[in-house]
Image (cartoon, rainbow, N blue to C red):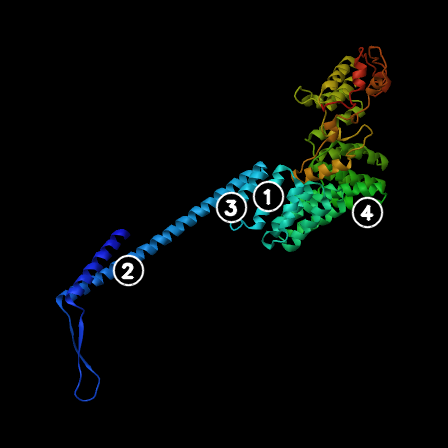
Amino acid sequence: MIRYLNIVTILLSVLSATFLILGGFPKLIFQIPVNEGPPVFQYISISPEAAAGMFFAGFAFLALLFSIILNIRKLLLNSQRLESLDKGSQINSFRAMLVAVAEGNITTVRKNTKKSGSALMPKGLTYFINAKSAEACGDSEDAISHYKAMLSDRDYLAMAQRGLAEQFFATSDYPKAIKHAKDAINKNKKSYWAYHIIFQSHVLEADWSKALETLTEVELSKHFDLKAIYRYRAALLSAETVRLSKLNQVDEALNTAAESFKFASNFPPAVVNYSHLLIERKEFKKAINVIKKSWRKDPHPVYAIIYRNLLEAGKIKNKEKYFDDLIRTNPKHYEAQMFKVEELLHSGSGNNALKLLSPYLSNDGVNERVCLLAANAEALKNNNLGSLEWLQKAVTAPKDANWSDISSEGIAFDYTKEEWIRLINLFGKKAELMHTRYEKGQKTLLPIKLVNSVIMDKKQAIDKKPNTHKGQGHHQEEKFEILIPDGLAQRLENLLEPSKKPK
């Protein structure tokens, strides 16, 4: 189109020039007055050839103008096209770098960075991409050096602070991680990721008090789940209670235990800590209410043990009434049924205990704890063979996860520092508990000690016919002697000993 316009313009220009040459240029005719005065225009003298030349010259000018417009438009389109191609090239280069970052191929990242050119790639972005590539390679030192280089670039400061905090956190350099995270918060209060770094750093350092302070700041930010914050606080306060108790700071321990229970009355370690401290202060009625409230929400077997102990320690009369009150708070729960069974066994009612256990004695639901309770119930009936069968099943039956929280000495939730760290995060995030003794297959408390004395003392007893004239309805421990085949005594003795794999 433009080429044709140029040809037309040239032809019109040639014609115009030819006619003007042949006809001469137009002449302006003026009349000069006789008297003094300016010349007066009369007319234009123009030949037909000159008029034709001017006509063609006009069209040539219009064609030239139109050609110039089209050329300008073409230049603009070409410029846009080149810019688009340039952007596409940059995008492809960035894409290649991101793929290299994901693969941890720092050589490719550097190659593409150089290829893009310094004009197209800001220094801060170059450092950031190289840092991410180093992270993918597992080269923390290189990543940290690139992030530090970004600190001087105002536009990339936030990215540098986060990168440094995360890298120092990953390498367990918690003080530096906390420093950079706090710097990020001071610069921008909405740097919510920094709260996570600070909080987890304090938790992993087992600095419960500072973790609690951070949790208060987290709550004030109003960005995080309030229920999760309460769970974290309950778990941290429980860990702090244990620490204070070991330092013999009883009053402070009691306060933190009460706070922990307030935030999560369904958290077993909080319940155990608080009730134990109340019992030590002889506040038995308050301890009873603590156990009953927690039992109503979600019973744990250790609650029943503490409940019995505090009734005994407080010399509270009419214990059966208190037992019934506890059961009625959550009567259909599995632990309530086990509590009933234990009370029936203590009272010497083996038949009723077996009836209550019957729904749990199937192959699908049976566990070590239930087997031992059934063995005791059969022993109370003087059914030595039946008792032995349940003891044999107990050897291979899976453990009761909740019951495994209680050690053979009757101590529950005696966690190490590392276990507390794990529990704090597990309960805080998911409202779940852990059973470390179950996982390790460690020795646990016997659910009830009736027939076990014979086994643990390795006595080879004789299977006697029961004497129906003596001791009916009453528990006599020496009467429940059973015949133990060779090898079984040792297996039963090791029943609750540590094993290589959790059962």
Badge 3 or badge 1: first in the primary sequence: 3
Q: Nearer the viewer, residue 53 or 158?
A: 53
Q: Is residue 413 above or below residue 213?
A: above
Q: For the residue labelled by badge 1, is the local secondary structure a helix, a strand or a loop?
A: helix
**SS of the residue at dot 3?**
helix
Q: Nearer the viewer, residue 423 or 323?
A: 423
Which is more N-terminal, label 1 or label 4? 1
Q: Compare residues 411 and 120 and report the one nearer the observer.
A: 120
Kind of residue at badge 1: Asn
Task: Classify mark 3: residues with Cα within 10 Å, few (<14), some (14-19) or many (20+).
Answer: some
Q: Is residue 345 above or below residue 489?
A: below
x and y percent of residue 29 in the render? 17, 77
Q: How far apart are labels 3 and 1 at the CA level?
A: 14 Å
Mark with earlier residue (2, 3): 2
Q: Which residue is mark 3?
A: 116
Q: Which of marks 2 and 4 precedes in the sequence?
A: 2
Question: Is residue 461 left or right of 143 when viewed as pictured?
Answer: right
CA distance separating discs 4 and 1: 50 Å
Q: Which mark is residue 34?
A: none
